[in-house]
Image (cartoon, rainbow, N blue to C red):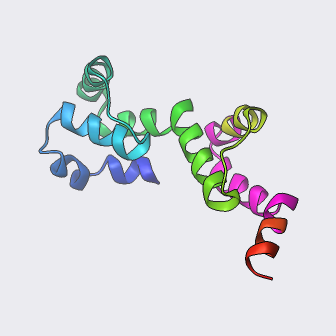
Amino acid sequence: MQAAVLGSDEAWNAAGRDAATWVDLMYRVTLGRASGSAEREYWAARLASSGRYQVAFGIAGSYEAATVRLRGYYQLLLGRDPDSGASVWVSSLLLAGNGDVFVPAAVAGSVEFSARAALRFP
């Protein structure tokens, strides 16, 4: 969903219809960081050959983006970063395309989440 929104005409117009600016916007929103010059050049070339949606899905579907989303789920639901074992396993679920529903549900169904919720809402 995020990639579809960021690949839209509205996002393209917000970036001034400039490839490098749009790629940097994608990185800031999707990965939480600025893009490097080599990254901007690579994706700008892909943008010219493949279009915005392909580039948006390429960035949003990357391993780095999956780990950013995973970290966000853990921070929101458990108040901590995921351990390294969870990062590898869960990021693979997110990359497979079905994890953005399964992963938050699994974390929210965990014993750790239940214990944390019981402390916050006795």
**Residue 109 colored magenta?**
yes
Instruction: Where is residue 15? Give x, y as percent.
Output: 18, 45
Identified at 62% across, 54% down, the residue is 75
Label total for image: 0
Identified at 41% across, 42% down, the residue is 32
- Residue 104 in which image quadrant: bottom right
Q: In this view, does 19 lie to the left or right of 27?
A: left
Vertical comparison of 10 with 116: above or below = above
Instruction: Where is residue 18? Give x, y as percent.
Output: 14, 36
Outermost residue on the bottom side: it is 122
Q: Is residue 108 left or right of residue 30?
A: right
Visible residue check, residue 62: no
Instruction: Where is residue 82? Give x, y as percent.
Output: 70, 43
In the image, 74 versus 41, the foreground residue is 74
Visible residue check, residue 76: yes
Vertical comparison of 99 with 118: above or below = above
Which of the image's four quarters has the C terminus?
bottom right
In the image, 37 versus 41, the foreground residue is 37
In the image, 68 versus 43, the foreground residue is 68
Outermost residue on the right side: it is 111
Q: Is residue 10 left or right of residue 63?
A: left
**Residue 73 colored magenta?**
no
Q: What predominant SS class does the magenta segment belong to?
A: helix
Instruction: Where is residue 4? Give x, y as percent.
Output: 39, 50
Q: What stretch is highlighted in magenta?
A: 92-114
Identified at 44% across, 32% down, the residue is 58
- Residue 84 in which image quadrant: top right
- Residue 89 in which image quadrant: top right
